[in-house]
Image (cartoon, grey):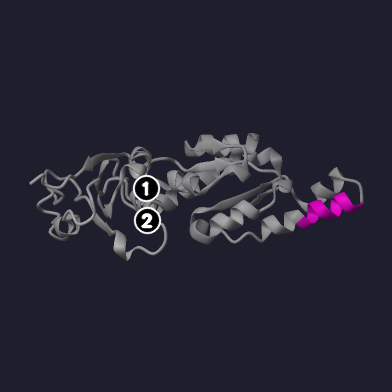
Amino acid sequence: LYASDKVSTCLSSRRADDINSIAENDMLSSMMQGTGGLVCSAVVEDGTKVVRGLNKKYGKNIYVIIVGCSDDAVEKSLKPGNELKKRIGMLKGWRKVQCNSIFEWSDLSKLDENAKSFADTLKASSLSSASDPDMRPGLLVFFPGIPGCGKSSLCHDVDANILGSSPSGGLTPRPVHICVGDKVEGKYWPLVRRERMSVPSSIFFADKNAPPTVWSTIADIAAASRAAVLPVFPDAS
């Protein structure tokens, strides 16, 4: 826990203490601009199932740090036998995790130094690969009307300049995204969540009928991705 606390402090990130409780929503939240990421502590016995599952989509955003687990240290901590073999086998599993990078910190006396160096490396990499994060809140437009109310026609005519998202006053233009429900394979609203949280400052049109049963989901997506919500109703006439 001390190691994860040091790393999270250096990165100004959120911390979690149960690797097996981490889900996709946690990954999406940690990847939002300006959040500092998520540092999660684990013990060898927790296994790599959750990490391997998340790696399928987010491997390039995952780093594994193995602390104080050199082969010598493990052999000294346990008597020869099945428990030692099991621990060594599980460690091999952690060392083979497919992710962005794996670090091994065997010298615990250098923990503070390693944590600062790791944080500096990640911050430098982030600065070199992206511009300053756009912390402006975004907008989520949805259509709570009945099917056939003209939402697709409206979305088809959406123009970035009409929306005022073109550069003005030195501001960076906002991305405008239209997600057409009929073109989405799989579940629609989880995709909206991923898209919204990847670019929180965007103006997002959810071109899909939104009955009352999904309004709470839309509200949750907006809250998690720093967006205002704009429902568009069909003309009563």
Image spot of residue 235 (x, y percent): 11, 46
Q: Main secondary structure of the magenta part?
A: helix
In this orientation, which residue lies closer to the viewer: 142 or 12?
142
Residue drawn at point x = 37 percent, y = 56 percent = 188
| Residue ID at (86%, 46%) | 76
Q: Residues within 10 Å of mark 1 (few under 14, many from 20)?
A: many
Kind of residue at badge 2 = Tyr
Q: Is residue 211 magenta?
A: no
- The answer to whether 88 appears left or right of 231 in the picture is right
Residue beneath the point at 68% across and 58% down? 95
Q: Which residue is mark 2?
A: 188
Q: In the rendered view, does 222 fall on the left or right side of 1?
A: left
Q: Position of residue 130 (x, y in %)?
A: 34, 53
For label 1, the residue is: 197
Mark 2, secondary structure of its residue: helix
Question: Closer to us: mark 2 or mark 1?
Answer: 2
Q: Position of residue 101 (x, y in %)?
A: 57, 57
Extent of the magenta region: 81-89
Which of pointers 2 and 1 lies earlier in the amino acid sequence?
A: 2
The front one of 149 and 53 is 149
Q: Residue furthest right?
A: 80
Where the N terminus falls, by quadrant?
top right
Callout 1: SS: helix
Left or right: 132 as drawn, with respect to 154? right
Percent x, y of residue 222: 33, 41
| Neighbours of disc 2 within 10 Å: few (<14), some (14-19), many (20+) | some
Disc 2 versus disc 1: distance between alpha carbons?
A: 15 Å
Q: Is residue 85 magenta?
A: yes
